[in-house]
Image: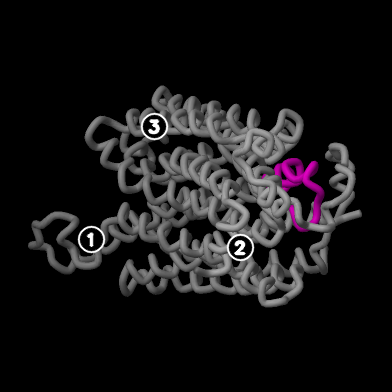
């Protein structure tokens, strides 16, 4: 039995039940969020984004931006609301809202009505990460927070894996409207388990569900053994470089995940179409189907592969700093070193377009590595908030940073729409993706440098 298992046997493991709840909420969050990208071509064919092919790219980016703009505003408010009403109620209200908004997409049949429902989804989904981060901070000591964050954050990948394996087939069998209805309804089931199993550590200690030893372990960080700090205003939080370090890091790297989330299916579909066109031009007598063209791949399966690999990255991202700390490395150095390592791997995506010409699976491999690195990075950047701020400010700071990430997402969505519209008109769509991959590959190193300059050492503020 390893030390981790021995510890759980000795003190209890109810905190991992809480982590499991957050994991499933995050899975549902990304399942609902992913449906749009997976049905982009279906919705385009149905006329939701207009009839002109080049304009469809721009109109699609407009719908994505409606989500991101609302998500940015929602992030700012969600953190404050969750710090105010508490984790249990705040998480529940958020999940009810985004489940109903996901179902509402079935009633949108043109760009702006779709944009409306995406905006409602953005506002309500914004509560997930502030609530999740606050939950992990309340239930785990510092040495386990990155690992727990990596585990729950892997739920984003699970949602992204499940979606391509079911959404296209639901849409094909029953229509795209049912894809939104059925995936939206799943989240409402989570509420039953949330209300059955979640309460604060103090409440669970009083009811006997939490052992005293585990309660003491959760509250074992010496620098947090102080009088609780009252809720801090947004303006006050904005005076700290630590807030800006987290926000800048999210602003620069969150958009990359947004790009993969909303444009990866379109990129792979485009690669298939290009290979089919080239093959038919060389073999005019060919009369087989698309799946018989050499080099054409099943893009739903490829998307599932990408996010499966990303799940491993998320868990490893939480494990590595924990391992470094257990080996005696200072917590700040462990976090910084891990984030630097994870900032290097996305550089491989610079080769995605070039390798895709040889074999689409080569492009899929580079994107999978980049997505895994992003999730590893994400597990650690979320944990920097609890490294630097008291528990009373966790959700608020997470919300401010999340707003920064969503604003960055707006920029990359509009950039993607304009670039792809321009190069689609020229018949060189792959060149537009090549430029976007350059941005995706370099963003993490830039973010790491910016965060290091703003906060040379992650430590609790006074």
Q: Quadrant of residue 339?
A: bottom right
Queried whether the magenta region covers residue 297, the answer comes back as: no
Q: With 387 as the anchor, is 99 left or right in this view?
A: left
Tell me which numbered mark, 1 or 3, is placed earlier along the sequence: 3
- Nearer the observer, 266 or 361: 361
Q: Can residue 154 be seen?
A: yes
What is the magenta segment's predominant secondary structure? Answer: helix
Instruction: Name the residue: 34% across, 33% down.
Output: 179
Q: What kind of element bears circle 2?
A: helix
Tell me which numbered mark, 2 or 1, is placed earlier along the sequence: 1
- Nearer the observer, 425 or 441: 441
Q: Quadrant of residue 357?
A: bottom left
Q: With 224 as the anchor, is 426 left or right in this view?
A: left
- Nearer the observer, 194 or 336: 194
Residue at which label 1 appears = 276
Q: CA distance from mark 1 to mark 3?
A: 30 Å
Q: CA distance from mark 3 to mark 2?
A: 30 Å
Q: Residue 180: which numbered mark, if any? A: 3
Image x and y of residue 312, in percent:
47, 63
Instruction: Name the residue: 74% across, 73% down.
Output: 333
Which quadrant does the C terminus fall into?
bottom right
Q: With 283 as the anchor, is 69 left or right in this view?
A: right
Magenta stretch, residue numbers: 386-403
Queried whether the magenta region covers residue 394, the answer comes back as: yes
């Amino acid at each position: 039995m390893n030390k981790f298992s021995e510890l759980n046997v000795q003190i209890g493991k109810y905190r991992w039940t809480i982590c499991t709840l957050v994991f499933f909420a995050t899975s549902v969050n990304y399942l609902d969020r992913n449906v749009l990208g997976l049905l982009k071509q279906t919705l385009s064919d149905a006329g939701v984004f207009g009839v002109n092919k080049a304009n469809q790219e721009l109109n699609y980016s407009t719908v994505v931006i409606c989500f991101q703009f609302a998500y940015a505003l929602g992030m700012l408010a969600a953190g404050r609301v969750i710090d105010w009403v508490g984790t249990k109620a705040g998480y529940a209200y958020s999940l009810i809202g985004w489940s109903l908004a996901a179902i509402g997409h079935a009633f949108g049949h043109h760009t702006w009505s779709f944009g409306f429902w995406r905006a409602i989804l953005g506002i309500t989904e914004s509560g997930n990460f502030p609530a999740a981060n606050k939950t992990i901070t309340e239930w785990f000591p510092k040495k386990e927070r990155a690992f727990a964050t990596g585990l729950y954050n892997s739920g984003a990948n699970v949602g992204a894996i499940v979606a391509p394996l079911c959404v296209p087939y639901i849409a094909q069998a029953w229509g795209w409207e049912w894809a939104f209805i059925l995936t939206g309804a799943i989240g409402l089931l989570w509420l039953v388990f949330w209300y059955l199993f979640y309460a604060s550590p103090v409440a669970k200690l009083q009811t006997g569900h939490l052992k005293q030893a585990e309660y003491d372990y959760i509250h074992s960080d010496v620098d947090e053994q102080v009088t609780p700090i009252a809720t801090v205003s947004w303006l006050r939080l904005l005076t700290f470089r630590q807030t800006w370090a987290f926000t800048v890091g999210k602003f620069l790297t969150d958009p990359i995940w947004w790009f993969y989330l909303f444009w990866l299916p379109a990129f792979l579909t485009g690669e298939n179409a290009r290979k089919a066109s080239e093959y038919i031009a060389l073999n005019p007598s060919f009369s087989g189907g698309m799946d018989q063209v050499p080099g054409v791949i099943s893009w739903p399966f490829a998307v599932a592969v990408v996010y499966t690999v990303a799940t491993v990255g998320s868990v490893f991202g939480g494990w590595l700093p924990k391992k470094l700390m257990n080996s005696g490395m200072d917590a700040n150095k462990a976090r910084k070193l891990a984030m630097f390592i994870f900032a290097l791997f996305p550089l491989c995506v610079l080769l995605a377009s070039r390798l895709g010409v040889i074999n689409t699976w080569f492009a899929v491999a580079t994107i999978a590595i980049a997505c895994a690195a992003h999730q590893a990075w994400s597990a650690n950047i979320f944990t920097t908030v609890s490294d630097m701020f008291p528990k009373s400010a966790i959700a608020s700071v997470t919300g401010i940073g999340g707003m920064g990430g969503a604003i960055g997402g707006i920029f990359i969505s509009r950039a993607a729409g304009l670039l792809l519209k321009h190069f689609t008109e020229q018949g060189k769509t792959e060149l537009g993706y090549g430029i976007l991959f350059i941005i995706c590959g370099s963003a993490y190193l830039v973010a790491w440098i910016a965060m290091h300059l703003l906060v040379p050492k992650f430590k609790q503020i006074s």
